[in-house]
Amino acid sequence: MIEINLLPENEKKGRKRKNAGAMLGSPAGVEKYVVIGTGVIAALLVVVLGYGSVSKVAAAKGKFDSLQAENRALDKEVSELSDKAQEIREMRLVLDNQWEILQSLDPPNRVLWCEKIEMLSSLIPSDVFLTEVNIDENVVEVELESSIAARQEWEKDGREGPKPQVVKKPIITYAFLLKGLTTGSNNIEQFDNVIKFHDALIGHEVKQASGETHRFMDNFNPNIEFETVEATLYEGVPVNEFIFRLKTTPSTTATNPEALRTAGKVNAKPSA
């Protein structure tokens, strides 16, 4: 059968274009699908990146918590060690103080007076007669070197807690007085006998069974003070009267120079 198209030419063309648009899709429709696809991709990227960031934050927080726990443990350990170190320092200070006090009470340079008197009886010349022997004791208390060091360290470091107590020890010195008379045919001989006694004190020494040599002047200052030497009469007999004074070195192993100077300035306390 023969079909006859009775539509106008323009309407035919419009209908063809409409059918072609339906087949291929309109530009507005394509743009719509592109926008939707881009949005979905962007949303997926945000989700992926957000998940990665959350994971990193969680890991960093876990690491931070772990470091905080380690720091607290270290602080506790340091505190405990500090307390133990302080206890050890205090114990050591006590021991140092006790040791220094014991040394001051029993020093290596102590004077054995029984030995000195025995030596004196052996060295005295025949023309010398002692009328008085006296020992004066000088005692002064000085702060221990360990006590000074502990106080200075406390002041320097600005440590907390009470200031270390001042601990002192005795420094003992002795003045040994010898008073006597010398005889002789004249004043010159009498004076020579005074010098002879002086030289005997300086030079006298005894060898012990152990092989050690002990001198009379051991633990004395090397100089003997001539307090007086004068010609006089004793029961009508011409004599020279003399007074010698010997001083011992401080009976301590170590101390500061100021304490040693102070020890020689204290008034004597008679002990014999």
Image: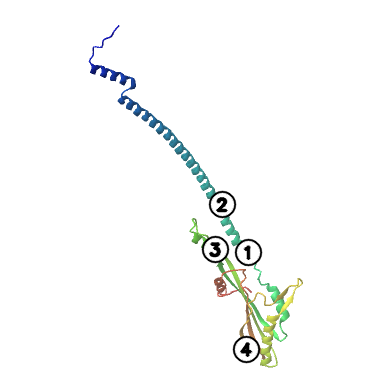
Earlier in the chain: of badge 1 and badge 2, it is: 2
Label 1, label 2: how far apart the Cα atoms are: 27 Å
Report which residue position mark 2 lands on.
84
Report which residue position mark 1 lands on.
102
Earlier in the chain: of badge 3 and badge 1, it is: 1
CB-based contact (under 8 Å), mark 1 and mark 2: no
Q: Determine the residue located farthest toward the top in the rendered image.
A: 1
Q: Residue at x 69, y 75 (%)?
A: 116
Earlier in the chain: of badge 3 and badge 4, it is: 3
Report which residue position mark 4 lands on.
230
Badge 2: residue crowd in 10 Å (few <14, some 14–19, many ≥20): few
- Quarter of the image containing the C terminus? bottom right
Label 3, label 2: how far apart the Cα atoms are: 20 Å
Q: Does 11 sit left or right of 152 as displayed?
A: left
CB-based contact (under 8 Å), mark 3 and mark 4: no
Q: Amino acid at mark 1?
A: Leu
> What is the tally of numbered marks visible in this picture?
4
